[in-house]
Image (tube, rainbow, N blue to C red):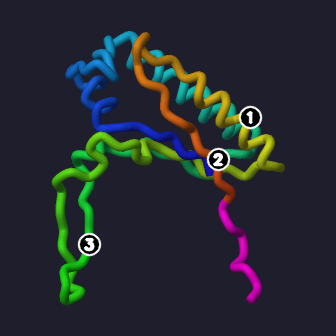
Amino acid sequence: MIMLQGTQTDYDAMEGSASKEAPVWRQDELQAMFRFMQKLNEDLAASGEFLEGQGLTAPSQARLVTADDNGRPVVSHDGYGEGREVLAGYWLLECESIERATEIAARVHQCPVPEGTSSHPVIVRPVQEEPPVA
């Protein structure tokens, strides 16, 4: 699995609200990112490696479920991911090796972004195929 990180600030910048960490994205910059991701997905599908992939909505649209002192669920939508990197999107791939997945992650990291945009990690993490034997 390849996981792309981002922050609420990044989503805000794509929607027109600038900050010192994230300048506003122009329409042509958004289109360049979408074209890049579309081409990546097409290439991964053509190679047979693509299983699934999705971009996720802004952290502000997430809900955080915890429990109160009595173990009852508590649902909150305030503060999730604020100021922190969170999962922004992912690709579930069938690769021959972690080295190949890492090559793909390096390509993901080359996605065009506006100058001055903060760089976030792209994480490669294998999916466990079978539970460990006890």
Q: Which residue is mark 1?
A: 103
Crowd around label 1: few <14 · some 14–19 · many ≥20 (10 Å): few
Residue at point 35%, 37% (across, down): 7
Q: Which residue is mark 2?
A: 124
Residue at point 23%, 49% (across, down): 61
Q: Which residue is mark 3?
A: 66
Disc 3 to disc 2: CB gap under 8 Å: no
Report x, y in % for residue 19: 25, 21
Q: Nearer the N terminus, badge 3 or badge 2?
A: 3
Q: Secondary structure at mark 3?
A: strand
Magenta residue check for 132: yes
Magenta residue check for 12: no
Amino acid at circle 2 = Val
Foreground: disc 3 or disc 1: 3
The magenta segment is 127-134
Amino acid at circle 3 = Thr
